[in-house]
Image (cartoon, grey):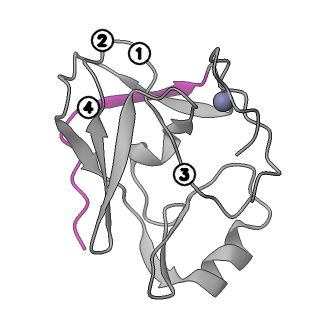
């Protein structure tokens, strides 16, 4: 599988949690940023591997398969969850594509709303947005 990233990102300490991915140039609204790199696995194996991680690097598909972005991943895995994000995720086959939700300025940290996660609301959200729902 091929996982292109169309914009050069800078991985640096996040304002939210751990490491984050920052735009190194402006990204116009709706542009495809890239496809999350990873290794295709099953949901069961992926969850077992993700158990001791504090960040979410596992994307689950409907047919019991999952993409483990911690193995063979790319910079897109450093995109943190936020309740008011500037990117969105779209699943196409086994590809997890990221798009700009609005115009993103150079130096902005990229964020995405993860949707349902295997943390089932137990992981505290630290996105800092005014409308933060508090948990993932
Ligand atoms: Zn939040």
Residue 91 forms part of the magenta stretch? no
- Residue 17, x across and y down, in percent: 68, 31
Q: Residues within 10 Å of mark 4 (few under 14, many from 20)?
A: some
Quarter of the displayed picture in which ligand 1 can be seen: top right
The image shows residue 65 at horizontal and vertical percentages of: 47, 84
Give the mark nearer the N terminus: 4 vs 2: 4
What range is drawn magenta here? 1-14
Magenta-drawn stretch, dominant element (helix, strand or loop) = loop
Residue labelled with disc 4: 8
Numbered circle sitting on residue 108:
1
Q: Nearer the viewer, residue 25 or 118?
A: 118
Q: If you read the primary sequence from the N terminus, does the residue marked by circle 1 or circle 3 appear first?
A: 1
Gap in angstroms between the C-alphas marked 1 and 3:
21 Å
Near mark 3 (Cα within 10 A), the count class, few <14, some 14-19 or many ≥20, is few
Q: Could you tell me which residue is drawn at 75 percent across and 40 percent down? A: 135
Q: Secondary structure at mark 2?
A: loop
Q: Earlier in the sequence, mark 4 or mark 1?
A: 4
Report which quarter residue 44 is drawn in.
Answer: bottom right
Estimate the x, y position of residue 127 in percent, counting from the top left.
65, 25
Residue 115, numbered label? 3
Mark 1 vs mark 3, foreground winner is 3
In the image, which is nearer the foreground, mark 4 or mark 2? Answer: 2
Q: Which residue is mark 2?
A: 105
Residue 69, given in percent of the width and then of the height, sits at: 49, 61
Q: Tell which tag, 4 or 3, sits nearer the viewer.
A: 3
Q: First in sequence: mark 3 or mark 2?
A: 2
* Discs 4/1, front: 1
Above or below residue 120? Residue 124 is: above
């Amino acid at each position: 599988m091929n996982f292109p990233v169309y914009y050069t990102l800078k991985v640096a300490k996040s304002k939210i949690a751990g490491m984050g991915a920052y735009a190194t140039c402006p990204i116009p609204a709706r542009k495809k940023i890239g496809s999350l790199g990873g290794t295709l696995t099953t949901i069961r194996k992926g969850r077992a591997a993700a158990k001791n991680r504090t960040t979410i690097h596992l994307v689950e598909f409907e047919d019991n398969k999952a993409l483990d972005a911690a193995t063979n991943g790319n910079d897109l895995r450093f995109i943190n969850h936020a309740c008011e994000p500037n990117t969105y995720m779209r699943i196409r086959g086994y590809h997890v594509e990221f798009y700009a939700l609005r115009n993103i300025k150079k130096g902005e940290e990229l964020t995405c709303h993860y949707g349902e996660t295997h943390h089932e609301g137990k992981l505290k959200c630290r996105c800092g947005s005014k409308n933060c729902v508090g948990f993932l």
